Amino acid sequence: MEKFIIRGGIPLKGHVEICGAKNAALPIITASLLTGETVVIKRIPKVSDVFTLLKVLKTIGCNYFWKDDSLTIDSSSITSTNAPYELIKKMRASYYILGPLVARFKKAKVALPGGCALGTRPVDLHIKGLTALGVKVEIEHGYVSCKAKKLKGHRIMLKGPHGPSVGATINVMMVASLAEGITVIEEAAMEPEVIDVANFLNKCGAKIKGMGTPIIEIKGQKKLKGIDYSIIPDRIETGTFLLASAITKGNVTVNKCLPEHNLALLTLLREYGVGIHEDKNNIRVSPPKTVKPLSIHAAPYPSFPTDLQPLMVALLSVTLGNSTVVETIFENRFMHVPELIRLGADIKMIDRYTAIIQGVKQLSGAPVMASDIRASAALILAGLVAKGETHISRIYHTDRGYDHIEKKLKKLGAKIERVSDPTAP
Ligand code: UD1
């Protein structure tokens, strides 16, 4: 295993280029299976979640090759519709294989992804959506088995107890693209990644309207065709570097991003006190004169994203005054808090959804452990301003969502090294 060693205290400076969005790349890779023709997807981030998904594709008989950051997928000779537990357990988003397989082959058997560090994370909304479209779903021996004689469009409400589901909206949209008749998804997720998948499908010949609103209408087609497509920039990686600039009082320009996808964050950062200068595809964060504590509510898009909540907690930990951070989506999304406390942060959990942060002047470096992708990014941000050395272990979590984050941070002046971790279990 590997770990990061960070020496804090350097304001970041310079330019950083953003990769394609992981959360759009994963479903678009599986959506390519709907066509059976060759698909070329550009701007795929080289993160380990993508490599895990590609292993799943390989086991079912798909061929692919890379050229730089562009991936060519040929799913013309799929040999199996079963996705095994050994691979699925590594990444929850493997459920994106279910929809396309059942849509194209009328059957699929995919291991249940189970829970993860963020909580139980059920798949009931995915199952509800597929069932409504005519899929017979059975759960046995840890697998979701799907069979369908005929797929037929339907009106489906996809809201769960924590709001709309990104994954279920996308899975249903993919199946409905090849179902007979019209499907209407109500209370659909509105995230930019949902829109990107819909745009990809439409370019393949699907007929989808309303993406980006709570009501999506899909007119099923007999067949989809292979295309070339370039995915959107990663708004969470964008936010990570904006927040890294803010926490180090740096001057970082984030290039090749889409500011319109980060409106909630940009509004909060302006209120916080940093300078924000944006044009169509770039955002520059300049150092603040004074900073203000904030009250944050992480909720479905267009609200502030849950995936940036841990990083915001890191920023507010070193912002004098009282801040409040409320999480509304995941039941267990404050795993970074005990680790930030080890670095000297003063954070109290009121309940499992609410953190009260009393900002401190200075954090101090210590060994800490990453628990998920974004918690690891929060610890990196904290390490960048902590006094002395911070050692972050279990950085395989970081690599699931960031393509060599340490290289980009180094280019901005950070003192961060990836080293092997002989003490890891
Ligand atoms: C996606 C993102 C993840 C992000 C999350 C919320 C990917 C690969 N991951 O995850 O980074 O944090 O959206 O923006 O795109 N739920 C149910 N039943 C279901 C499905 C979900 O109750 O069948 C619940 C979840 O437990 C959660 C909420 O709905 O409380 C939202 O989850 P969802 O939007 O589905 O998250 P993912 O698509 O898994």
Image (cartoon, rainbow, N blue to C red):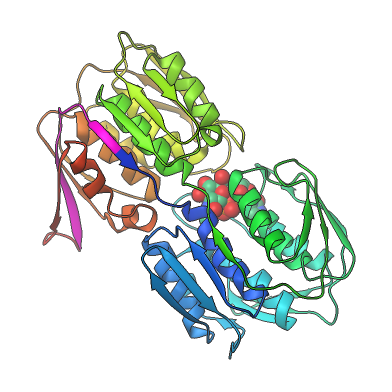
State yes or no: residue 173 in magenta. Answer: no
| Residue at image coords 47%, 82% | 58
Image coordinates of residue 312 in percent, x first then y, are 40, 30
Q: Looking at the picture, tell me which residue is in the foreground, 408 or 347.
A: 408
In the image: residue 377, left or right of residue 193: left
**Res. 145 image quadrant:** bottom right
State yes or no: residue 8 in magenta. Answer: yes
Examine the residues drawn in magenta and state their main secondary structure. strand
272 relative to 141, above or below: above
140 relative to 230, above or below: below
- Can I make out residue 412 in this image? yes
Pick the quarter of the image with the N terminus: bottom left
**Res. 152 image quadrant:** bottom right
311 relative to 98, above or below: above
Q: Looking at the picture, tell me which residue is in the foreground, 252 or 291.
A: 252
Image coordinates of residue 305 in percent, x first then y, are 52, 37
Q: Looking at the picture, tell me which residue is in the foreground, 120 or 174.
A: 174
| Residue at image coords 20%, 42% | 411
397 relative to 278, above or below: below
| Residue at image coords 72%, 47% | 211
In the image: residue 373, left or right of residue 228: left
- Can I make out residue 346 in this image? no
What span is in magenta?
1-15
Pick the quarter of the image with the C terminus: bottom left
Image coordinates of residue 153 in percent, x first then y, are 87, 64
Q: Looking at the picture, tell me which residue is in the foreground, 139 or 395.
A: 395
